[in-house]
Amino acid sequence: MASITEVARLAGVSTATASRVVTSVDYPVSPQTRARVLEAARALDYVPNALARGLLKSRIPVVGVIVHDITDPYFSEVVRGVEDAATPGGYLVITCSSDRKPERERSYVRLLRSMRTAAVIFAGSGLDDPDLNDEVSRHVVGIRDNGGAVVHLSPHAGGQAEVGVDNVAGIASMVEAVAALGHRDIAYLAGPTSLYVARARLAGFRRGLADAGIAADQRNVLHTSFDRQGGALAVDLLLAGDAPFTAILCANDLLALGALARLAERGVSVPGQVSVAGFDDISVAALTAPALSTVRLPLRELGRRGFEHAIGLLDGNELAREVLPSEVVLRDSTAPPPGAPIKPGKGTV
Amino acid sequence: MASITEVARLAGVSTATASRVVTSVDYPVSPQTRARVLEAARALDYVPNALARGLLKSRIPVVGVIVHDITDPYFSEVVRGVEDAATPGGYLVITCSSDRKPERERSYVRLLRSMRTAAVIFAGSGLDDPDLNDEVSRHVVGIRDNGGAVVHLSPHAGGQAEVGVDNVAGIASMVEAVAALGHRDIAYLAGPTSLYVARARLAGFRRGLADAGIAADQRNVLHTSFDRQGGALAVDLLLAGDAPFTAILCANDLLALGALARLAERGVSVPGQVSVAGFDDISVAALTAPALSTVRLPLRELGRRGFEHAIGLLDGNELAREVLPSEVVLRDSTAPPPGAPIKPGKGTV
DNA sequence: CTGAAAGCGCTTACAG
DNA sequence: CTGAAAGCGCTTACAG
């Protein structure tokens, strides 16, 4: 591969001059010289070495995104948002699926640091794991010391997201919507307590209940994984338990998908006998039968704003925390509870 | 950030020695020296600069994957496979969503080349666009000249995939399965003809028809986009047309999802009045109502093998083309045509 | 077993 | 407007 040295030689100029024209930096170069350099670069199919440039700047135009799993539609949507914002500025995005395993997350963050990526975005929630967080925060300090930007899109060990959503208010508003349909006995699939975001959503569930004047029934709050299987398992538990429930709210859509599937297998009709609602509004949510009621999060926008926040940091700006809006979306999986009076103006959309 | 120079100084050794121990290369260093260097590295929170190392090797342990859209479950699955294979060797993966736009693909490939990524994997099908392909193949040559590996997972302008699936046989076997159910009037949503993979699948459809002794009805072959909207549109066209059909086969699952949704809207029952089948078996395919019959492609494995193929190339091996198996999966969206005799041993699984 | 030195491909003060 | 030279942080023959 041709280097700037060869381009300069072919054009009969110094590497300094050649560099100035190919980087199209704002520096005076005579038109003839410029043309000669450009022609030489074209002839040699010159493509600058980003590694050399990065070494000099001690930073490379790449943003790393740490996700749970790129295959989870929540995260692919966020990553797409990051990419959409990153592309115009010539940034590339590295995706890291940590599977929420401390060792994987740790090694990814270290690798990203070793690559001197300009920014690292933590898309998923932090894990409450002291060992992990010690090492990760050491790397975060290292990245920032080096002039890199670090942004969180979810609550984490260090506190709130720099760019995030209001999880508490989001779940609370779904509780409100379901309560407005007439539900009083509301079960909740809470996800893993080790995840900060799940804790926030659980707090939102409790707040929603309190706001609606409903006494919480601890038997109806289930701690689960954050995937479909967790939703299916929880339905079995709920069905086997003795606490009444007419609605199941879930801390994310994957849980709701699992719950929907298991409910169908067990012959429980949704929303006839039980209403189900998710959280996130991943793209499949509208495709299930019945279509899932959920809380829509602006996932792509979250990724986009996350990257823009990082750029702001890189530019040395003082940045305020940002909270993106969420919205309750009632589809076909929620309805008044069996035997509930139909109130005008309420019901599924 | 501490450099190897500082580590060496703190340990009281040369950078050469320090480098030898931190890279744990197979080179004799006395145990005491080694311990001192390791301790210095730890004390300084030393993380090697991958850019400097990459500049020296003129290659960085990163693999770029060009996809249509990371949000499309087909591609997120493939990317996950690449990542699973890449991680153990310390490789990072860059995802590039080209949206099948020539300018985007072009600029991504150039950026990847400028980063001297060790490998570039084209996950999606090539576009039949001469301008694009000229420039892309120039970059491919450049990457290979530089010792990098380039792998295609789909047919492209340059020929067959190095690691791929047999699209022709895959669709043909779905035609066979549907014909075995008793269908004779089979419509086909072909996807965009500008995509090499869509052409291969169309050829497979024709071959399947011929094998089953069914005369092709050109009115029932529709050229579409490759997304849900294309499937919905095609259903409208089919319904408005005068060619009879009892089954709709689709060149990918997204088309089938769109067809399913529009058929439901139009009040056509699936599989009662019309059978529908997709191709790919993306994760949502099992979640729709009715669950979609499709051809399962080992997507994650495709990504994994693609990366391993790249590593083989990097190691200088002479590699054979590889074709991964596909499998017909009959779920609930296919059944015998209305009024067809039920033959024992046939039917949905 | 250890170290001095060259060099990977750039950019950028600095001098003219 | 142009160029000579230093230096970013590594690794690796080469010499001892």
Image (cartoon, coloured by chain):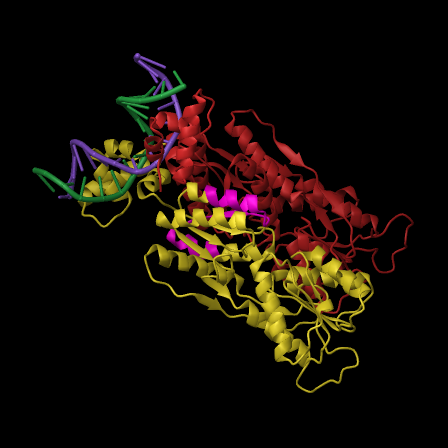
Chain colours: A yellow, B red, C green, D purple
In the rendered view, does B130 fall on the left or right side of A2? right
Position of residue A203 measured from the top left corner of the image (x, y, whole percent): 59, 68
Q: Is residue B234 visible?
A: no
Q: Residue at x 32, y 57 (%)?
A: A316
Judged from this view, the residue extending furthest toward the bottom is A344
Membership of A109 in magenta stretch: yes
Position of residue B111 measured from the top left corner of the image (x, y, whole percent): 41, 44
- In magenta, the rendered stretch is A82-111
Judged from this view, the residue extending furthest toward the right is B344
Position of residue B222 measured from the top left corner of the image (x, y, whole percent): 65, 55
Membership of A52 in magenta stretch: no
Using the image, determine if residue A44 lies above or below residue A155. Answer: above
Quarter holding the C terminus of chain A? bottom right
Quarter-of-image position of residue A39: top left
The one of B49 and A344 positioned closer to us in this rendering: B49
Count of number-bearing discs: 0
The one of A289 and B144 positioned closer to us in this rendering: A289
Q: Residue at x 71, y 81 (%)?
A: A182
Q: Is residue A306 visible?
A: yes
In the rendered view, does B284 fall on the left or right side of B11? right
Position of residue B39 measured from the top left corner of the image (x, y, whole percent): 42, 33
Report the magenta stretch's main SS. helix
Using the image, determine if residue B62 lies above or below residue A24. Answer: above
Quarter holding the N terminus of chain A? top left
Quarter-of-image position of residue A171: bottom right
Q: Residue at x 70, y 86 (%)?
A: A343
